[in-house]
Amino acid sequence: MVLSTLYVSAQTNGSNSPYSRFGLGNLSDQSQGFNKAMSGVALGFRNGHRINMQNPASYSAIDSLAFIFDVGITLQNANFKSGNNSVNAHNTTLDYIHAGFRLAPGLGFSLGFIPYSSIGYNFSESTYLGNHFNSGTAMSYTSTYSGDGGLHEVFVGLGWNPFADLSIGANIGYLWGSYSQDITQTFYEGGTATSSSNGLHRQIQADLSTYKIDIGLQYPIKIGKDDILTPGVTYGIGHTIDSPAHYYNYMTNGDTAKSTIEKAFDLPTSFGAGLAWAHKEQWKVGLDVTHQRWGNANIPQIINDQFVSTNTNYHNRTKVAVGGEWQPDAYSNKYLRRVQYRLGASFATSYYKVDGVDGPKEFGVSAGLGLPVSRNASNRSMVNVSFQWLRSAPGNSSLMSENYLRLSVGITFNERWFMKRRIQ
């Protein structure tokens, strides 16, 4: 109930960024409590005490005795800077809700909720037109841009270990959300809004819903007495979303033009490859590379006063993340030796262009702790705390730069529901 209240009252769709007006908005990193502090590294990670939804093949490793429930929130402070202007914004978001358990030997099950993207912005810019040729008063207009919405996903997943060490898995999800963008232009004469020239109000609206399928594979390789190297790959199926987008062009004289594009959006095909190296049960390091084919995805846009669905102004997005975790002794009776210490770093390109220029590149570093909830070494429940700094750095100095500080808290309940106790 507390998390629901946070989600409804405090979340502003997870974004205040003007860049969320492009494409489907700002994309969620979809990381969880255990890997947020490792900048989202996950594709090669397997652990029987965690749910790793970023590679569903990992579900086959879920402990046979455990029921796992995982939930997380993030508190974010964002700073947006353009020239000498700077603005701060605060958000609280629900990051994910997951549950998982084993159905049969080598067969794990998971279900959950996770955001996919967020749209939330409101900004304006003024343009000076010159002086009126009769009165000599200054003429100008102000353009106001605002948007709201985002996509969310609920899913069920299976991970299966059919033979040897090979595991395969799939998440099958339902993706839904809203998409709303507004552009308003108001003309001024001498600082006062004028009715001599018609103002402009344009609006794009859509309610989206579709399926989402992600497939994963993992193959642990023992490379020594105490070391395991696990490659992991994922594939997300891209397709056209069977939802229309509506365009409204309102004029102050009362005229309205409306047009509709059926199947206006595409979900991009995605690929991922990762490698994780585990030594004993003490430390793990991983490297992930993910790639999304936004250059082939159509998005509704207004181009030269025409409402079209096109991939113009979009290009493919690539993200590289590296991270690691160290736990001195998972079975120690000393609390601090069971704490998990994590670090990570990431780099990502944008998937859109702004006025013909590639959007900002994203750099991030993160750190955090996995804190056991009990001094009992057999208890696997964990509180995951992470701190993350992200910077969106545009290649063009005229574009806005963004800096984010995030505090994320995730709670993993790992209870032994399926243990059969015997009394002799």
Image: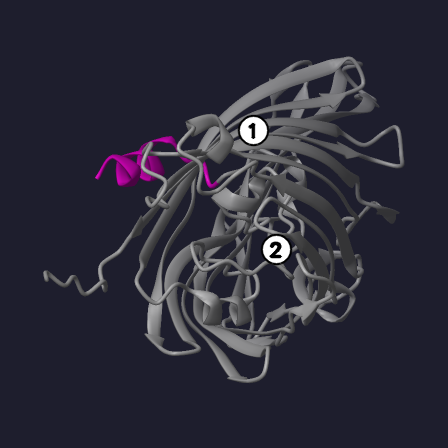
Relative to 131, is 228 above or below? below
- Determine which residue is flagged by label 1: 406
**Residue 176 or 377: which is nearer the viewer?**
377
Q: Is residue 73 visible?
A: yes
Q: Disc 1, disc 2: CB below 8 Å?
A: no
The magenta-colored residue range is: 1-13
SS label for mark 2: loop
Q: In terms of image quadrants, where is residue 268? A: bottom right
Query: Is 409 covered by the magenta stretch?
Result: no
- Determine which residue is flagged by label 2: 42
Horizontal and vertical percent for residue 183?
Answer: 60, 42
At horizontal 50% and vertical 39% (from top left) the residue drawn is: 14
The quarter in which the C terminus is drawn is bottom left
Q: Amino acid at mark 1?
A: Arg
**Residue 120 or 292: which is nearer the viewer?**
292
Horizontal and vertical percent for residue 368?
Answer: 56, 31
**67 horizontally vs 402: left or right:** left
